[in-house]
């Protein structure tokens, strides 16, 4: 029962990370979604985002499956992975607030791979058919992003390919409101979600949650 509760909490955490990162999503990918909303059929925005979330699920399945294969669930493994996930959550909160940009170094490390993928994704984005929109989204899902890497640390906790995919699906679902808004709604919403004050507020909430999670992990040692 406790394991089920923990897994549900992890899914909620992934969902909240996606929701909290609305402004970051718009800065990283919002321009692409906006261009698709203006230059293509409206349903292509949905297909693009379906492709993007599908790629998150694939990465989550790879990470969760790898952990399940090479580091089967055990007390030590679980504790290490949970600490890693909480640290990533803290770094993500600091990233959103602008107080510490440590996750930028991870993004930079993945840039060489992205530089090879991006031209293909850009060409597909301008194609007039739905398949191209979906495939473009699936490629843009590999864009180096500290927020995605943080979510993947929670997918690693799942310990299986299926659960890892579900965790990243929850994260992707959280990012949808901002990305769909970028494709269909007003510039006011864009400016609001991208405002530093909003990003700071979301970052602070994530920092508080990360610190609370750390206290929860430490608490058993003092009982």
Image (spheres, rainbow, N blue to C red):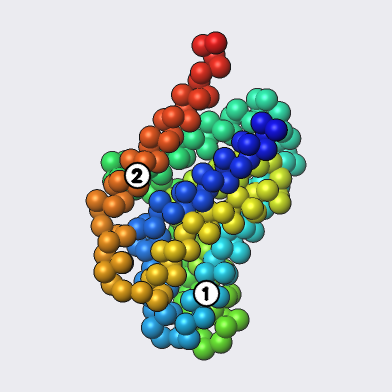
Q: Which residue is drawn at 57% across and 69% down?
A: 50
Give the distance between the C-alpha atoms of the residues marked 1 and 2, in whole angstroms. Answer: 27 Å
In front of the other: 195 or 64: 195
Residue placed under numbered mark 1 in the picture: 46
Q: Which residue is drawn at 36% across and 74% down?
A: 185
Residue placed under numbered mark 2 in the picture: 203
**Helix, strand or loop status at disc 1:** helix
Q: Which image quarter holds the C terminus?
A: top right
The answer to whether residue 163 is left or right of residue 139 is right
Question: Where does the image place residue 11, in percent across and percent down from the top left?
Answer: 58, 46
Question: Where does the image place residue 23, in percent across and percent down from the top left?
Answer: 35, 58
The answer to whether residue 176 is left or right of residue 59 is left
**Helix, strand or loop status at disc 2:** helix
The residue at the far top in this view is 223
**Residue 153, image quadrant:** top right
99 versus 51 height, above or below: above
Q: What is the crowding at mark 2: few (fewer than 14 residues within 10 Å), some, or many (at least 20)?
A: many
Question: Where does the image place residue 147, in percent across and percent down from the top left?
Answer: 45, 51
Q: Residue at x 47, y 82 (%)?
A: 42
Q: Residue at x 40, y 76 (%)?
A: 184
């Amino acid at each position: 029962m406790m394991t089920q509760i923990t897994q549900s909490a992890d899914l909620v955490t992934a969902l909240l990370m996606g929701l909290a990162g609305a402004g970051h999503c718009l800065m990283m990918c919002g321009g692409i979604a906006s261009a698709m909303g203006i230059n293509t059929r409206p349903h292509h925005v949905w297909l693009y985002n379906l492709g993007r979330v599908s790629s998150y699920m694939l990465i989550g399945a790879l990470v969760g499956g790898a952990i399940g294969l090479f580091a089967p669930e055990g007390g030590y493994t679980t504790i290490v992975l949970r600490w890693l996930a909480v640290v990533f959550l803290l770094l993500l909160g600091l990233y959103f607030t602008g107080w510490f940009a440590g996750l930028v170094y991870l993004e930079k490390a993945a840039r060489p791979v992205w530089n090879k993928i991006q031209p293909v994704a850009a060409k597909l984005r301008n194609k007039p058919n739905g398949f191209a929109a979906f495939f473009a989204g699936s490629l843009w899902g590999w864009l180096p992003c500290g927020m995605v890497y943080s979510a993947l640390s929670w997918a690693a906790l799942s310990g299986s390919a299926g659960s890892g995919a579900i965790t990243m699906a929850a994260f992707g679902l959280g990012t949808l409101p901002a990305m769909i808004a970028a494709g269909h709604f007003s510039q006011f919403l864009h400016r609001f979600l991208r405002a530093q004050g909003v990003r700071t507020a979301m970052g602070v909430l994530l920092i508080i949650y990360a610190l609370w999670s750390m206290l929860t992990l430490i608490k058993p040692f003092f009982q």
